[in-house]
Image: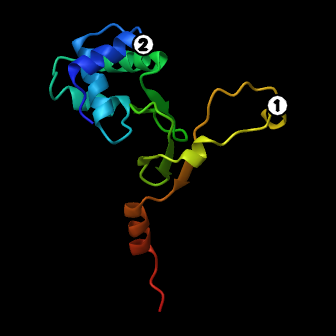
Amino acid sequence: MTLHPQEIEARFRRHAVRVTRQRAAIYAALVETGSHPTADDLYRMVTRQHPAMSRNTVYYTLGVLRKAGLVQEVNVGHEVARFDGNVTMHHHLICVQCGRIEDVMDQELDQVKISNRRAKGFHVLGHRVEFHGYCASCREGRRDASPSQG
């Protein structure tokens, strides 16, 4: 999805985020990518168009955008944090081999609830379901590496 500068500005204003060219470029790169990049991945993406941008600006901006609710941080195991520009209700498929993350839109999963008894006093604000396994590419690679039977 390509975001127009006016749409980015409107989203920032709705979430009380000061609009700068650097922030807009970082946000647009994240929203427009179908992947779930790390901060370093985003830095490499945005410096193609904005070579003077610092790595620190990318890290700081991601913190501002996350706190404002414009992006989500996705932590996969003990890996470096990844970021998601899609803040609508959705879930993830995560490859345990290559780390690929795919969005899953599923209304049934959106409706999952936990009983008050099982919540054990937690006030639940939301949930996200993660499915862990092997993506098609890694599954194919595993088949190629397995000993042949015969």
Q: Earlier in the sequence, mark 2 or mark 1?
A: 2
Where does the image place residue 135, in percent across and percent down from the top left?
43, 58
Query: What secondary structure is marked by label 2?
Result: loop
Looking at the image, residue 36 sits to the left or right of residue 47; the answer is: right
Residue 140 in view: yes
| Residue type pointed to by label 2 | His
Pick the front one: 47 or 114? 114
**Alpha carbon distance from label 2 to label 1:** 32 Å
Which label belongs to residue 120? 1
Q: Is residue 91 above or below residue 134?
A: above
The image position of residue 115, as x and y in percent, is 79, 37
Q: Secondary structure at mark 1?
A: loop
Q: Is residue 57 left or right of residue 143?
A: left
Name the residue tied to disc 2: 15
Q: Quadrant of residue 145?
A: bottom left
User: At which x and y percent is residue 106?
Assistant: 52, 48
Q: Residues within 10 Å of mark 1 (few under 14, many from 20)?
A: few
Q: Nearer the viewer, residue 95 or 23?
A: 23
